[in-house]
Amino acid sequence: MHVRSGLKLLFISFAIVFLFGCKSEKEDPAKMISGGKLESKFEKLEGQDLLEEASLLLGEDVFFASLDFYIESKEKSLAVISTEVKNRTTYGVKFTLVEFTDDLAEVKFCTDFIDGIKETSDFGIREFPDINRTFLFYNSRSSFIGSSGGELFLYLFEIKTGELFTFYFFEENQKIKLELSKNLKETQNFLLRDWFLLEGQKVIPEISMHKGSELYVTK
């Protein structure tokens, strides 16, 4: 699933932060930000200010950020989705959970950059109250859909565990490919699989179910 964990952002003398690990393929691994009690610092921010501060913290282009009690901690944690564009031809999205403890910020979980872009996509927080689980979600929607075929990427990133669930649809020259991550075949994740199906059908109505378990595409 390409999920990394346990990487730290160290704050020194309440003024400087250095970022180590769990980073994109940028040349400079060190980034700086003003310190203070970090959870309180971020809690005062909202909207574009929160996105900009999260981008500075991680050294990435953060386009979604949410601060809440996502894990068992006395302080809130920061769940973000970021993007990176290389030479305007290579695109990717990334999920990260940052845990705050006074002057220490730890990247508890993060993925690699995976297929996706910010433009025309749908993303945010998705809660499943029936199973008491909360996720960051991403839906590329029509971003990669064209007259000659296209692709659809759907992701769920479980904030509490860092587990990534993926749905991938590909069509080219009338050939169909539909892939789900292996963890969606586990019984406890069938509800998530059904969510992927319903979301996929909003973009590609031909996606359907077969015998209650297998996914396929009719064309």
Image (cartoon, rainbow, N blue to C red):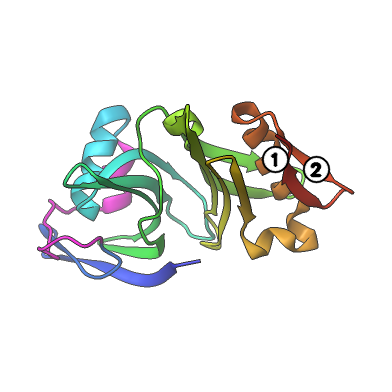
The residue at the point 66 percent across, 42 percent down is 196
- Mark 1 crowdedness (10 Å alpha carbons): few <14, some 14-19, many ≥20: some
Q: Amino acid at mark 1?
A: Leu
| Labels 2, 1: front one | 2
- 132 vs 171, nearest the viewer: 171
Q: Earlier in the sequence, mark 2 or mark 1?
A: 1
The label number, if any, that marks residue 209 in the structure image: 2
- Cα–Cα gap, marks 2 and 1: 8 Å
- Magenta stretch: give its range: 24-44
Q: Which residue is nearer to you in this view: 175 or 195?
A: 175
Q: Is residue 177 left or right of residue 23?
A: right
Instruction: Describe the element under mark 1 as helix, strand or loop.
Output: helix
Helix, strand or loop for disc 2: strand
Position of residue 87 relative to residue 161, above or below, is above
State the predominant SS element of the stretch in magenta.
loop
Disc 1 target residue:
197
